[in-house]
Image (spheres, grey):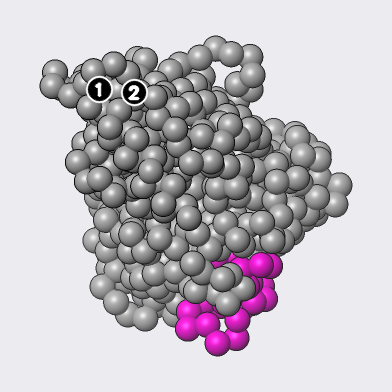
Amino acid sequence: MLSRLILIVTAISFMAACQPKKREIIFPKTDLSKTALIPKPLKTVPTNSAFGLSKNTVIYTSGSKYEQVGLFLSEKVKSKTDLDISVNTNNGEVSADRHIYITESDSVDLKTPESYQLYIKKDSIFLNAKTAAGAFRGIQTLRQLIPNKSNDTLTDHPLWLIPTGKIFDEPKFEYRGAMLDVARHFFTVDEVKKYVDILAYYKYNVLHLHLSDDQGWRIEIKSWPKLTQIGGATEVGGGAGGYYTQDDYRELVEYAAQRHMIIIPEIDTPGHTNAASLSYPILNGNGKTVKSYTGTRVGFSTFDTRKDTVYSFLDDVIREIASLSPGPYFHIGGDESHVTRKRDYIHFVEKVEKIVQKHNKQMMGWNEIAQGNISASTVTQLWNEPHNALKAAKNGSKIVLSPGEKTYLDMKYDSLSKYGLDWAGLIPVDVAYKWNPETYVEGLSTESILGIEAPLWSETISNIEELEYLAFPRAIGYAELGWSSSENCNWEGYRKRLAMHVSFLNRMNVNYYPTKLVDWE
Ligand code: TNX
């Protein structure tokens, strides 16, 4: 029935196309509010017709930053439909009969830098945003609205029918992150880029890289070259390790920036520092001879928190990395320092905070840092101690929520999972989704929550297929919890929409875990 309708519509449009005057196209009834968008937009108003994306569509943008967004859309349209859509030119030959306008707007309805409005009409699409980041988020929505198949019964002018209507959208949280541990096992620049690509499609804006741990040091520091020469050469299980040169790291930062994402570098201290102390034994504070470590225990290493060299070392490391990182944050770790005395730990955190601030960054750290007297600009990342997050929030700090039992991508899905750990419990796809960040910590106000982040620790995974298996589809659910209003987060609705994302995951060659909780299309 529908295909017959489409055939008739196409025939009409084909006949109309032969006419010199502008053609009137009647499209099948659509419903924009029933599309499988993830994250679900704040508000959708369907108008039940369709915009026909075709080779004669042209994208027009305002300003140079918006042009980049337009070019990104054109590239993605090409890879999904094989259409060549030009940006800010109609190539002189085609008669552009449908337009996509990506425009800077100062409308008061756009409440955050990432808010956007999408007006889809029969012959034009208008995407309005305050910033290029907002336009970029809107582009992801548009990508998801382009059907996988064209209505191409008449092959010379196939149309990809996009439902018409209006979308008003904005993020719930300004910070929507994923963390990747490249220290336990190293992941290459190309592997990280692939992860960034998928995250960007779901409107993430932060990739936190865990760049050092007991088992490896992963970023070149010019003033302390042995960190990578020695500390970069190991990983869990005895593999070859690896590290990013500063140029590699710049490339990742740039790649993320093109997707309006920041990279947050983490150098884990004062514990989790065996690889650093192996490279420069003067840093070691646990009283033992440092040996290389490729196991998975935690909590046995520490810097010597009373030694000046440790702080001049950190000043160099933070200076070099901060100068490569345009984002506002520098993460100092701070977790599981079980062999650092409490007063030494506090002394350390307070001193390092000053160093981070000297290099014009806001400090970020795991929830243990709130034992110290930290400033209100420092961000505390909750993983296992709500009382420390509450203490930090009381002092004016913002909190990023990464509770182990809900957001740890390295927890197994079920007891049969091939990869992953289970210390925080098993996390099936529904458990990962069915919690409300705004009410998760009793007594923590929504205003104190900067956002959420899903960490992927890599003790049990060593390549991109294994990474993807643990990350997907759970990371897609966190994207919705971070972006969509609580009222719009609903497991039954989400699992139906998620089922429709299998074509994207397949097209991107993503090795997701095919949970039985979802009736995959
Ligand atoms: C705890 S969470 C850690 C990591 C481990 C992880 C494994 C946190 C701040 N520290 O060192 O890799 O558990 O799930």
Q: Secondary structure at mark 1?
A: loop
**What residue appears at the point 51 percent right and 69 percent down from the top-left corner?**
520
Location of residue 421 with respect to 339 vertically, above or below: below
The dot on residue 23 is 2
Location of residue 174 with respect to 23 vertically, above or below: below
**What residue appears at the point 28 percent right and 49 percent down from the top-left corner?**
153
Q: Is residue 438 left or right of residue 402?
A: right
Amino acid type shown at disc 1 = Gln
For label 1, the residue is: 19
**Image: magenta residue range:** 408-431
Q: Is residue 113 visible?
A: yes
Question: Magenta span has 424?
Answer: yes
Q: Position of residue 13 (x, y in %)?
A: 33, 33
Front in this rendered view, residue 430 or 46: 46
Q: Image quadrant of residue 41?
A: top right
**What residue appears at the point 69 percent right and 33 percent down from the top-left corner?**
376
Magenta stretch: helix, strand or loop mostly: loop
**What residue appears at the point 14 percent right and 18 percent down from the top-left corner?**
92
Disc 1 and disc 2 in contact, CB within 8 angstroms: yes
Q: Position of residue 197 (x, y in %)?
A: 37, 49
Q: Is residue 373 left or right of residue 46?
A: right
